[in-house]
Protein backbone atom coordinates (compact mmCIF):
# COMPACT_ATOMS: atom_id res chain seq x y z
CA UNK A 1 0.00 0.00 0.00
CA UNK A 2 1.43 3.34 -1.02
CA UNK A 3 1.07 6.22 1.44
CA UNK A 4 -1.26 8.92 0.23
CA UNK A 5 0.15 12.30 -0.62
CA UNK A 6 -1.12 14.43 2.19
CA UNK A 7 -1.47 18.06 3.05
CA UNK A 8 -0.90 18.59 6.75
CA UNK A 9 -3.59 20.60 8.55
CA UNK A 10 -2.70 24.28 8.69
CA UNK A 11 -2.76 26.11 12.00
CA UNK A 12 -5.35 28.84 12.36
CA UNK A 13 -5.55 31.87 14.59
CA UNK A 14 -8.41 30.21 16.48
CA UNK A 15 -6.81 26.78 17.03
CA UNK A 16 -3.08 26.23 17.03
CA UNK A 17 -2.07 22.86 15.66
CA UNK A 18 0.08 20.93 18.14
CA UNK A 19 1.62 17.62 17.16
CA UNK A 20 2.68 14.54 19.11
CA UNK A 21 4.65 11.52 17.97
CA UNK A 22 3.54 8.34 19.77
CA UNK A 23 6.05 5.47 19.53
CA UNK A 24 4.31 2.15 20.14
CA UNK A 25 5.84 -0.98 21.71
CA UNK A 26 9.47 -0.52 20.73
CA UNK A 27 10.60 -2.66 23.65
CA UNK A 28 13.47 -5.14 23.59
CA UNK A 29 11.23 -8.22 23.70
CA UNK A 30 8.81 -7.03 21.03
CA UNK A 31 11.32 -5.61 18.57
CA UNK A 32 13.19 -8.94 18.75
CA UNK A 33 10.29 -10.49 16.82
CA UNK A 34 10.46 -7.96 13.99
CA UNK A 35 12.37 -8.91 10.84
CA UNK A 36 10.58 -6.86 8.20
CA UNK A 37 12.32 -3.47 7.80
CA UNK A 38 13.48 -3.41 11.43
CA UNK A 39 16.54 -1.21 10.87
CA UNK A 40 14.60 1.19 8.66
CA UNK A 41 11.82 1.53 11.24
CA UNK A 42 14.30 2.29 14.05
CA UNK A 43 16.09 4.83 11.85
CA UNK A 44 12.80 6.51 10.96
CA UNK A 45 11.70 6.74 14.58
CA UNK A 46 15.03 8.23 15.68
CA UNK A 47 14.82 10.75 12.84
CA UNK A 48 11.28 11.83 13.73
CA UNK A 49 11.76 11.76 17.52
CA UNK A 50 14.53 14.34 17.25
CA UNK A 51 12.76 16.51 14.67
CA UNK A 52 11.53 19.98 15.55
CA UNK A 53 8.21 19.17 13.86
CA UNK A 54 6.75 17.63 17.04
CA UNK A 55 5.71 19.41 20.21
CA UNK A 56 5.73 16.17 22.20
CA UNK A 57 7.28 12.71 21.72
CA UNK A 58 5.81 9.82 23.71
CA UNK A 59 7.24 6.36 24.28
CA UNK A 60 4.23 4.05 24.80
CA UNK A 61 5.01 0.41 25.55
CA UNK A 62 3.76 -2.36 27.82
CA UNK A 63 4.97 -1.91 31.40
CA UNK A 64 2.61 -3.85 33.64
CA UNK A 65 2.88 -4.62 37.32
CA UNK A 66 1.43 -7.71 39.03
CA UNK A 67 -1.60 -5.80 40.26
CA UNK A 68 -2.38 -4.05 36.96
CA UNK A 69 -5.59 -5.25 35.36
CA UNK A 70 -5.43 -5.94 31.62
CA UNK A 71 -7.20 -8.46 29.40
CA UNK A 72 -4.01 -8.59 27.33
CA UNK A 73 -2.25 -10.48 30.14
CA UNK A 74 -4.30 -13.53 29.14
CA UNK A 75 -2.76 -13.47 25.66
CA UNK A 76 0.70 -12.01 26.12
CA UNK A 77 2.99 -12.74 29.09
CA UNK A 78 5.51 -9.98 28.36
CA UNK A 79 5.64 -6.31 29.26
CA UNK A 80 6.50 -6.98 32.89
CA UNK A 81 7.54 -3.94 34.88
CA UNK A 82 11.24 -3.57 35.80
CA UNK A 83 12.43 -6.30 33.44
CA UNK A 84 15.15 -5.61 30.87
CA UNK A 85 13.09 -7.32 28.17
CA UNK A 86 10.25 -4.82 28.60
CA UNK A 87 12.45 -1.72 28.41
CA UNK A 88 12.72 0.55 25.40
CA UNK A 89 15.33 -0.67 22.92
CA UNK A 90 18.82 0.83 23.45
CA UNK A 91 18.75 2.47 20.01
CA UNK A 92 15.94 4.76 21.19
CA UNK A 93 16.74 5.21 24.87
CA UNK A 94 18.95 8.21 24.18
CA UNK A 95 15.92 10.08 22.85
CA UNK A 96 14.17 9.85 26.21
CA UNK A 97 15.49 11.25 29.47
CA UNK A 98 13.13 8.98 31.44
CA UNK A 99 12.80 5.82 29.29
CA UNK A 100 10.95 3.71 31.86
CA UNK A 101 9.45 6.16 34.31
CA UNK A 102 6.01 7.50 33.71
CA UNK A 103 5.78 11.27 33.98
CA UNK A 104 2.56 12.82 35.31
CA UNK A 105 0.20 14.30 32.75
CA UNK A 106 0.64 17.75 34.27
CA UNK A 107 4.38 17.90 33.54
CA UNK A 108 5.62 19.25 30.24
CA UNK A 109 8.87 17.68 29.02
CA UNK A 110 9.24 17.37 25.28
CA UNK A 111 9.74 13.60 25.62
CA UNK A 112 8.05 11.28 28.07
CA UNK A 113 7.02 7.71 28.79
CA UNK A 114 3.36 6.67 29.12
CA UNK A 115 2.61 3.12 30.23
CA UNK A 116 0.61 0.88 27.89
CA UNK A 117 -1.74 -1.88 29.06
CA UNK A 118 -3.49 -3.29 26.02
CA UNK A 119 -3.46 -3.33 22.21
CA UNK A 120 -4.36 0.34 22.06
CA UNK A 121 -2.05 2.83 23.76
CA UNK A 122 -5.22 4.68 24.82
CA UNK A 123 -6.81 1.72 26.64
CA UNK A 124 -7.34 2.30 30.40
CA UNK A 125 -5.66 2.66 32.79
CA UNK A 126 -3.27 4.41 30.37
CA UNK A 127 -3.04 8.18 30.82
CA UNK A 128 -2.21 8.78 27.14
CA UNK A 129 -5.36 10.75 26.38
CA UNK A 130 -5.00 12.88 29.51
CA UNK A 131 -1.36 13.53 28.63
CA UNK A 132 -2.19 14.62 25.08
CA UNK A 133 -5.01 16.84 26.34
CA UNK A 134 -2.81 18.47 28.98
CA UNK A 135 -0.36 19.43 26.22
CA UNK A 136 -3.24 20.58 23.96
CA UNK A 137 -2.24 18.15 21.23
CA UNK A 138 -4.45 18.18 18.12
CA UNK A 139 -2.52 15.86 15.77
CA UNK A 140 -1.20 12.40 16.69
CA UNK A 141 1.41 10.63 14.57
CA UNK A 142 2.00 6.92 15.16
CA UNK A 143 5.15 4.84 14.72
CA UNK A 144 6.17 1.44 16.07
CA UNK A 145 4.75 -2.08 16.07
CA UNK A 146 2.69 -3.96 15.12
CA UNK A 147 0.98 -2.33 12.14
CA UNK A 148 -1.83 -4.90 12.16
CA UNK A 149 -2.35 -4.95 15.95
CA UNK A 150 -1.35 -2.15 18.29
CA UNK A 151 -0.75 0.56 15.70
CA UNK A 152 -4.14 -0.16 14.14
CA UNK A 153 -5.90 -0.30 17.54
CA UNK A 154 -4.27 2.95 18.67
CA UNK A 155 -5.23 4.70 15.43
CA UNK A 156 -8.86 3.75 16.01
CA UNK A 157 -8.82 5.16 19.55
CA UNK A 158 -7.06 8.32 18.39
CA UNK A 159 -9.90 8.77 15.90
CA UNK A 160 -12.54 8.04 18.56
CA UNK A 161 -10.84 10.63 20.80
CA UNK A 162 -11.15 13.30 18.09
CA UNK A 163 -7.47 13.66 17.21
CA UNK A 164 -6.23 14.09 13.67
CA UNK A 165 -4.43 10.75 13.41
CA UNK A 166 -1.56 9.84 11.09
CA UNK A 167 0.45 6.64 10.63
CA UNK A 168 4.00 7.05 9.34
CA UNK A 169 4.40 4.26 6.77
CA UNK A 170 8.19 3.94 7.05
CA UNK A 171 7.96 4.01 10.85
CA UNK A 172 5.76 0.94 11.38
CA UNK A 173 6.21 -2.80 10.89
CA UNK A 174 4.79 -6.16 11.96
CA UNK A 175 6.00 -9.49 13.30
CA UNK A 176 3.78 -10.92 10.55
CA UNK A 177 6.16 -9.45 7.99
CA UNK A 178 5.23 -7.58 4.82
CA UNK A 179 1.82 -9.27 4.66
CA UNK A 180 0.85 -8.22 8.19
CA UNK A 181 2.16 -4.70 7.62
CA UNK A 182 0.13 -4.39 4.42
CA UNK A 183 -2.99 -5.79 6.09
CA UNK A 184 -2.69 -3.29 8.94
CA UNK A 185 -2.40 -0.34 6.57
CA UNK A 186 -5.36 -1.61 4.56
CA UNK A 187 -7.49 -1.83 7.73
CA UNK A 188 -6.51 1.69 8.74
CA UNK A 189 -7.37 2.93 5.27
CA UNK A 190 -10.64 0.98 5.19
CA UNK A 191 -11.94 2.49 8.41
CA UNK A 192 -10.51 5.95 7.70
CA UNK A 193 -9.30 6.27 11.28
CA UNK A 194 -5.91 7.68 10.28
CA UNK A 195 -4.09 9.04 7.25
CA UNK A 196 -1.04 7.08 6.13
CA UNK A 197 1.82 9.51 5.50
CA UNK A 198 5.48 9.32 4.57
CA UNK A 199 8.49 10.84 6.27
CA UNK A 200 8.75 13.22 3.33
CA UNK A 201 5.22 14.46 4.04
CA UNK A 202 6.38 15.39 7.53
CA UNK A 203 9.83 16.75 6.71
CA UNK A 204 8.37 18.80 3.88
CA UNK A 205 5.93 20.41 6.34
CA UNK A 206 8.34 20.91 9.25
CA UNK A 207 7.78 24.64 9.28
CA UNK A 208 3.98 24.36 9.34
Image (cartoon, grey):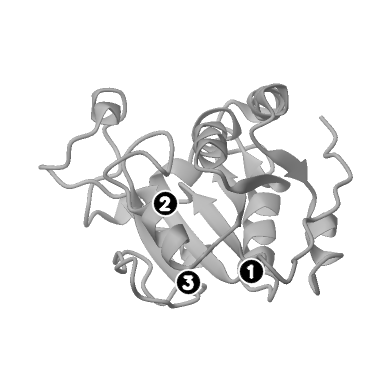
Q: Earlier in the sequence, mark 3 or mark 2?
A: 3
Give above or below for 50 relative to 3. below
| Residue found at x 61% / y 38% | 35
Q: Position of residue 207 (x, y in %)?
A: 81, 74
Number of numbered discs on residues:
3
Q: Position of residue 50 (x, y in %)?
A: 63, 73
Judged by depth in the image, the label closer to the viewer, 3 or 2, is 2
The residue carrying mark 3 is 111
The crowding category of the residue bearing disc 1, from other C-alpha atoms within 10 Å (few below 14, some 14 to 19, many at least 20), is many
Q: Is 68 placed left or right of 191 in the picture? A: left
Between 137 and 180, the residue placed more toward the observer is: 137
| Residue found at x 33% / y 53% | 127
Work out how far the residue at label 3 is from the one at label 2, CA to CA, in angstroms. Answer: 15 Å
Judged by depth in the image, the label closer to the viewer, 2 or 1, is 2
Q: Is 36 placed left or right of 63 in the picture? A: right
Work out how far the residue at label 2 is from the one at label 1, CA to CA, in angstroms. Answer: 17 Å
Between 83 and 124, the residue placed more toward the observer is: 124
| Residue found at x 82% / y 39% | 3
Query: CB of mark 3 within 8 Å of CB of mark 1?
Result: no
Between 33 and 155, the residue placed more toward the observer is: 155
Q: Secondary structure at mark 3?
A: strand
Q: Position of residue 21 (x, y in %)?
A: 58, 59
The crowding category of the residue bearing disc 2, from other C-alpha atoms within 10 Å (few below 14, some 14 to 19, many at least 20), is some
The residue carrying mark 1 is 54
The residue carrying mark 2 is 129
Amino acid sequence: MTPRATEMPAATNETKTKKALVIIDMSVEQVAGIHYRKKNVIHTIRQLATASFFDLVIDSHLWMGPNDVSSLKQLYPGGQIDTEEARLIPELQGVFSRPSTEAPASSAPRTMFVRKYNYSSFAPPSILNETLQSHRITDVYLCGINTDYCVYATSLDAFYSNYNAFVVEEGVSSFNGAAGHKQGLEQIDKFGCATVVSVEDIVGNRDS
